[in-house]
Image: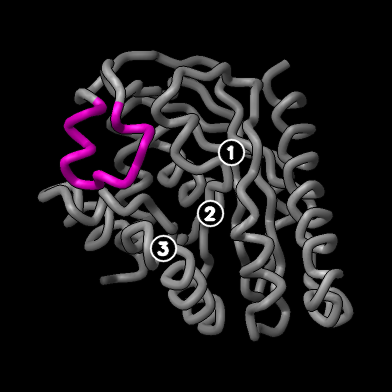
Amino acid sequence: MSLNSPLLISRLSLAALSTRMFRYYEDRIPHDASVLVVSNHRSFMDALILMAALSSPIRFACHHYMGQVPILRELVTGQLGCFPLEDSHQRQQSFFTQSQLLLQSKQMVGVFPEGTAPMVKSTQPHNVGEFQRGFAHLALRASVRDLAILPIAIASLEEVNTTSVPLRLLSLFDPTEALFNQPGLHPLVIYRRVAVLIGRPYWIKPQQQQQYQGKQAKTVVAELTEHCHCEIASLLRQGCY
C-alpha cells in the first residue's frame, strides 16, 4: 500500500461528495512522534475526514465485518489501510497487537471509542456517546516512546441523512454483533459542511505506565478515558454552536 494512497483517496472522496471542511487548532498536531488519534464517530466519512484534516494516512481499527464484505474489504483494507478487528473471541488481543506494531513504527493509529452504536443508531451532531476504554489500555501498555493521544472532534455543520443496507444483512458477515440483529436500515450521514477541531495532545508519561498495574490500573484507565471524552465533548460543543 502506498502511504500517499489513503490521503489521496480521502481528498478525492471529499471533493466528489462536495464536502467543505474547516480545520481548527492544526498547530496542536504532534510531529516526529507516535500518535493515537481518538475521535467521535457518526459517519462512514469520519476516517476520510480525519486523514484529510491531518494531511496524513491514519491506520484505523475498524469493525470485523468490514474485512468480510467483498469490495468493501478491498477499499477499507487495501486502499485506506484500515485493519479490521478479529471476531469477538480474539478482538481485544488483535487490536492491541496490531496497534502497538503500527505505533512502534511511528504510524498514526485511529480509534473511534464510541464503537458501532452511533453508526447504527441515528444520533445528534452535538452528542458524543460513552467511550469504550480499549484505547486507554493500549496507550498505557504499549511499549512506545513519545506516544501522544490526540483527541479530535468532528462537528457536523450541515449534513444529509439517508439510509443504506438493512442492518440484518450485516449480521451475515458478523453474527456476533448484537446491534445488527434488529430491523431497519443502516443510517448514512453525509457531511456537506464539517468542522474538525483538534484537541490538545495528551502525552503518556512513564509514571502513568508504572501506575498501570494492580488496583491502580483501573483508576488510571478511567481517568485517561474521561479526559479524552471531556476534551472531545468540549470541542464538539464549540464546533456545533
- Judged by depth in the image, the label closer to the viewer, 2 or 3, is 3
Secondary structure at badge 3 equals helix
Q: Amino acid at mark 1?
A: Asn
- Residues rendered magenta in the picture: 167-181
Left or right placement of residue 222 versus residue 84 in this view: right
Q: Marks 3 and 1, how far apart in space? A: 20 Å
Q: Position of residue 128 (x, y in %)?
A: 64, 30
Q: Answer whether residue 38 is magenta in the image.
A: no
Left or right placement of residue 69 versus residue 91 in this view: left
- Circle 1 is placed at which residue position? 40
Vertically, is 170 above or below 62?
Answer: above
Q: Marks 2 and 3, how far apart in space? A: 14 Å
Secondary structure at badge 1 equals loop
- Residue 162 appears in which quarter of the rendering? top left
Q: Name the residue: 36% across, 47% down.
A: 10
Q: Amino acid at mark 3?
A: Arg
**Label 3: few (<14), some or many (≥20) within 10 Å?**
some
Q: Position of residue 58 (x, y in %)?
A: 46, 60
Q: Amino acid at mark 2?
A: Val
- Circle 3 is placed at which residue position? 91
- Circle 2 is placed at which residue position? 111
Q: Quadrant of the C terminus?
A: top right
Instruction: Of the two numbered discs 2 and 3 on the same chain, state the one appearing first in sequence.
Output: 3
Residue 94 is tagged as none
- Residue 80 appears in which quarter of the rendering? bottom left
Is residue 82 at all visible to an observer of this figure? Answer: no
